[in-house]
Amino acid sequence: MRLRRARVVPKGDGEEVTPESVRRPAELDKVFAEALDVLLDESKNAKDGQEEVVEAGRRSWSLTESVQSENGGLWTVSNITAPEAGPGAAEQMAAIAQKIQTLLDAFTRDGQAGPRTTTDIVFTTVLLRSMADFPLMNSIYVSLFKKPNPPARATVACGDGLPDGVSIMVSMVVDLGPRDLRQGLHVQSRSYWAPANIGPYSQAMSIPLQGAERVVYIAGQIPLDPASMDLATPSREICSWAETYCLRAVLSLQHMWRIGTVMEVGWWLGVVAFITGTSHIQTKAQLAWKLWKKMHEQSPQEPEEEDDCALDAWDIKYGRKELERRRVVAAPKLPNFDLVQTNTATPQAPAFLAVHVEELPKNSDIEWQGLGYRCTGIKMSRKSLEQGQKIDATTNENLSHTCIEIDHGPPGFDLKLHVQCALESCFEPSGAFHTVIYTTQPLSQDCCPGQIIPCKSIWGAEGRPLAAAVILQRQV
């Protein structure tokens, strides 16, 4: 390309451009802004009187050992504690870090030694007694991960729900496959997109399973304004608790959605909304469910708009390649209803739990933690049980994800018995499950074959109060 008679001229007078002149993107995308409007309307209709929340009396836990399970190329180690190291969070986290290193060094598979490293850890759950211990825990936790793409992580404080003497409990998921097949997302710079992760955890880790399927572990998302990294608040100076909560619920779910979209998630296997506070807990749980349900309503198909694209001289001369490229690339759909087969007239929302805990990072009142999946097809079903209901999701390559909701029972209700029945209903001797148990009551060691999340209260689909919930994941 040749330019004739090019010359430099003085810059003309015009409006001065300042940083404030740059357009700031809207806080919420269109679909989430619409969801917020719906949620605010729902909050006005919510009953805000005395809420009956069933909480069991506090009893001591007797968990003494961590639990391990290996299935489908994933190895889970749950409930790692170190009360013997002393009462302080720093001492316990240092001892837990040493235990993690020892477990990884000693790992064997099919009788063959195959030590793993901390780079193979793809997801962790950190339970604290108090969020005040977070800085001490994090300063030692970070020493475990020195390479790019540390594991995604969810961190919550359970208060006195943890076993006596335990200040920190850590569970981890380890990928046993080739490291070069993993995909990680670790954005550390500030933007208007989603919160930066300047700490030792990634936004997401994507792991290949059977066939072309991938499971995507996504870090817990709290409602931070991405640009300022402060908790989001409504623009009005005076607003109700419901307005603040609804905005934060929607914004933090949008963070999870944006991460899932970038990681090419087609469907969510399930989600947990951790909530906090001493009031409005039932209403918070029900609003979180309504938001989750709203985001999985199938809207009428709208024709896609074609972007205007200006072709330059190169495109015109060499075959309009840019136009063809733009037409081929399609935005990923989340949720992708084309993937779903169901036993109901329309696809239902994936498994949902609202879990009431003591505290969340940054003193947030909600944190969404989801499990995404990339696949070519998935079957969903719901089944009523004697003491609750079961939500199953099975992929074309036979990954099974089950959520069992266990309702409260009459006086004398034996939660341990119902948890055992739930586990036995899914048990198959041919393989192990990755199990997570959310419970409002302490359970004995023999009833806990997986990760434990002690809760103040639990709520399931439709905002139903639960005594416990069990998540089971297995690759056939």
Image: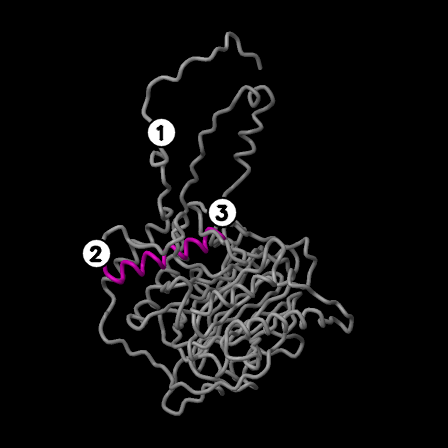
Badge 1 marks a residue whose secondary structure is loop
Judging depth in this view, the residue of 301 and 39 nearest the camera is 39
Q: Is residue 363 above or below residue 83?
A: above
Q: Is residue 451 above or below residue 204?
A: below
Residue 238 has which mark?
Answer: 2
Q: Quadrant of the N terminus?
A: top right
Q: Quadrant of residue 388?
A: bottom left
Residue lying at the far bottom in this picture: please name it.
Answer: 412
What's the residue at 38%, 68% (across, down)? 275
Q: Which residue is mark 1?
A: 17
Residue 241 is one of the magenta-drawn residues:
yes
Badge 2 marks a residue whose secondary structure is loop
The spot of residue 31 in percent (x, y) is 37, 49
The amino acid sitting under disc 3 is: Ser
The amino acid sitting under disc 1 is: Val
The spot of residue 182 in percent (x, y) is 63, 55
Q: Earlier in the sequence, mark 2 or mark 1?
A: 1
Magenta residues? 238-259
Residue 189 has which mark?
Answer: 3
Mark pair 2, 3: CA separation: 32 Å
Q: Earlier in the sequence, mark 1 or mark 3?
A: 1
User: Horizontally, is 256 left or right of 289 in the view?
Assistant: right
The amino acid sitting under disc 2 is: Ile
Q: Earlier in the sequence, mark 2 or mark 3?
A: 3
Badge 3 marks a residue whose secondary structure is loop
Mark pair 1, 3: CA separation: 24 Å
Q: Is residue 384 visible?
A: no
Q: Main secondary structure of the magenta part?
A: helix
Q: Quadrant of residue 172?
A: bottom right
